[in-house]
Image (cartoon, rainbow, N blue to C red):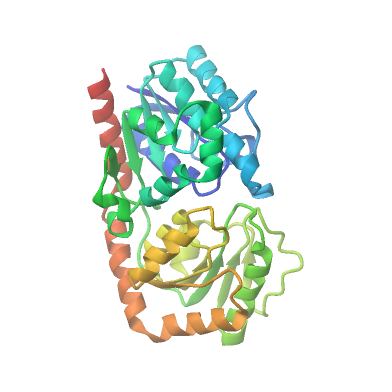
Amino acid sequence: MTRYLLATWSGGGNLPPALAIAAELVRRGDTVRVIGHDDQRSAVESAGLPFEPYPTGMQWEGSQGSNPVAMFRVFHDAALGTDVVGSITREPVDAVIVDCMLLGVLKNVQQEGVPTIVIAHSFMSFWHRWRRNPLTALFSARLGVRPDRLWDAADAVLVTALPELDSASARPGGATWIGPLVPPESAPSTGDAVLVSLSSVNLPGQRAVLQRAIDAVAELGLPLVVTTGPAIDAAGLRPPAGAEVHRYLPHPEAMRRARLVIGHGGHGTTMTALAHDPPLVMIPLHPMIDQPLVAAAVERAGAGVALTKSASSASIAAAVRRLLDEPTYRVAAARLGADIRTTNAAARASDLVEQALARAS
């Protein structure tokens, strides 16, 4: 039995892939406990894993704000690393699984000589850009180490992306592409609704984009399902008669009902949608996140259309109509969906973790 600590942060789509890997390790007889931000407790404990909050490190609640400077302080917070080292001192583990963005945690744990496994929960081509971001450079200089040095020092780097969509897979370095981690029950959708589902993190202008997407589907008279997530209060939204509006709907249930998805291009939501075969209209909400890169890759693959954040309801409606009228989009999405469903990414990740620890011992 191998003992793991999973170190995460409240970033929305970063948690489900980490929990999927943890679930597979537990299924194999290992133990995994999780340290993270307070608002992650419910999701972690619902997955059957022990949870502890960071006692002294910077607190963060993703659904309540998206201040870039504050977020980068979280990523580089040495106190979070101190909290993790304190946790594994009290209750030793064989390895720490770390979100690739938690550089303060990676630095402290690696200094302790404990094996580290890094989860890169989007395209590696995005992480290459992210490490060159001026804010990353500024805060990494204060931390005293570059992100790529910390990733290179890890015992394994697991990239949860589909290689054919990620241009960085042509020059892998020390990373391994395991494929997207999607719910195991993912299957081709059979529904007739348009699903509108944007970020669970509160991003600037998100509410206005959500309303324009709702208006677009209303103009077309199509069945509509909306998930607002914790970032948007449904009060004040103007859905058409007969539309369903949910604060939360499990992804498998929502995607099974969708013939088309309007999303924000976030990696987790986009890959989960594709795992159910519907084409996507993607409206990236923030230029510093992975959304524009993911949306562009899916559009190049022929499985969707990317629009700007300022797109009108008429433009969104035209994109929806185009995707429904031209079967090539559904065919391309279904091809990617079949690839995602056959990756068995959680098992692949767990195999690589076990191999990495065998090499480190």
Q: In which quarter of the image is the N terminus?
A: top left
- On the image, the x and y values in percent for residue 46 come to 53, 40
Residue projecting furthest to the right = 236
Left or right: residue 184 versus residue 76 is: left
Does residue 234 lie above or below 3 as drawn?
below
Q: Position of residue 193 (x, y in %)?
A: 51, 75
Q: Residue at x 33, y 43 (%)?
A: 346
Number of callouts in the render?
A: 0
* In front of the other: 37 or 227: 37
- In this rendering, the answer to whether 299 lies above or below 250 is below
Residue 126 position within the rendered picture, expressed as x and y whole percent measured from the top left: 42, 51
The quadrant the C terminus occupies is: top left
Depth check, front residue: 330 or 313: 313
Q: In which quarter of the image is residue 175?
A: top left
Residue 5 visible in the displayed image: yes
23 over 82 or under it: above or below: below
Residue drawn 62% across and 46% down?
A: 68
Residue 50 makes an appearance in the image: no
Residue 2 placed where, x, y %?
34, 22
Q: In this view, does 88 lie to the left or right of 26?
A: right
In the image, 209 versus 26, the foreground residue is 209
Identify the residue at image location x=60%, y=57%. 248
224 relative to 60, above or below = below
